[in-house]
Amino acid sequence: MTTPRRSTPAPFQSGYLVRLPLFTRLVLLAIIAFWLLEFQTIWSVVQWGALIPEEINLGTMYRLNTYPIIHTGFFHALFNALALTPLLERFEAEHGTLTAVALFIGPLSTVPAGLYILIERGILHMNTSVVGASVWVFLLLGSESIKTYKSHPNFSLGPYKIPTWTSPLFACVVVSILVSNVSFLGHMCAILVGYLLGLGYLKVFVPPEKVLRWIEGKLNLLGRLPHYVSVDQKTYGRYGVLPTSNAPGASGNSTPMSFLGSNQRLGA
């Protein structure tokens, strides 16, 4: 028997935005803030925070965390925010705010970035920079596809049975075809890390629940922070629903890592 999952409300549903959990709100505010900062001409926000393989050193490690919240224009930021919000809101509601903070500021940003740099610079010998929250969008889609695969291994496309875990790969290909100047490699790296998350291989990066409860109690986070999701409030457990049975059947320019994209180019 499997536990039914909570449906994800549409971003524009009445009252949805006011119910967003804390970390999701902070991410959206950061995206908006960095987009607004792009209007000033003294400091190039994109050049400062983009993931540029040749620019990564001990003094610029912050780029491994800043690139998902920086975008190359209004529509790039808007479409990525719309795609990310329901996925991130669901993740935080299922796992708790502290877990979301630990993962998204840590391995869910740095691991895709490291994998991208390894392939882009080490194997392809290129230096295409990337920015955009679609790294998290495709990562979460990858994780969700693994969870869905456990209960619904296939979906039908005409006479063909397609494994459900491949759906983010199809989305990645379609976006790359329909939207110009997006990072196919960046999205693929994100999907791969999402698969690892869905399979549970990234659990090692999550602090033990005892530690999280101690922090929450010591700082009284639930009482002090509006919209905070505690370890004991999360909807379906830290790593979501794991079904027990299967369904029958088988350089200054930056390339947007955008889900629905932007018309600006990453790299030269």
Image (tube, grey):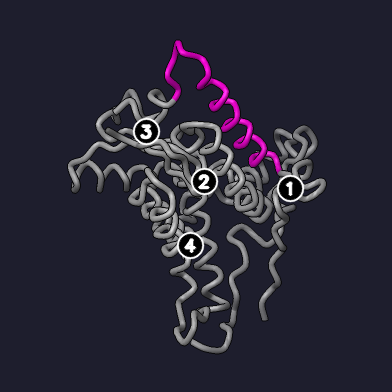
Question: N-terminal of the two: label 1 or label 3?
Answer: 1
Location of residue 88 in the rendering, given as x and y in whole percent from the top left corner: 61, 49
* Residue 200 numbered tag: 4
* Residue 108 numbered tag: none
* Residue 103 numbered tag: 2
Q: Is residue 219 magenta?
A: no
The alpha-carbon separation of the residues under discs 1 and 3 comes to 30 Å
The amino acid pointed to by label 2 is Leu
**Which label lies toward us, 1 or 2?**
1
**Which label lies toward us, 3 or 4?**
3
Q: Secondary structure at mark 2?
A: helix
Question: N-terminal of the two: label 4 or label 2?
Answer: 2
The amino acid pointed to by label 1 is Phe
Location of residue 226 in the rendering, given as x and y in whole percent from the top left corner: 77, 36
Q: Secondary structure at mark 4?
A: loop
Location of residue 186 in the rendering, given as x and y in whole percent from the top left corner: 37, 48
Question: N-terminal of the two: label 3 or label 4?
Answer: 4
Specify the quadrant that holds the N terminus: bottom right
Specify the quadrant that holds the C terminus: top left
The crowd level at tag 4 (other Cα within 10 Å; few <14, some 14-19, many 20+) is few
The amino acid pointed to by label 3 is Ser
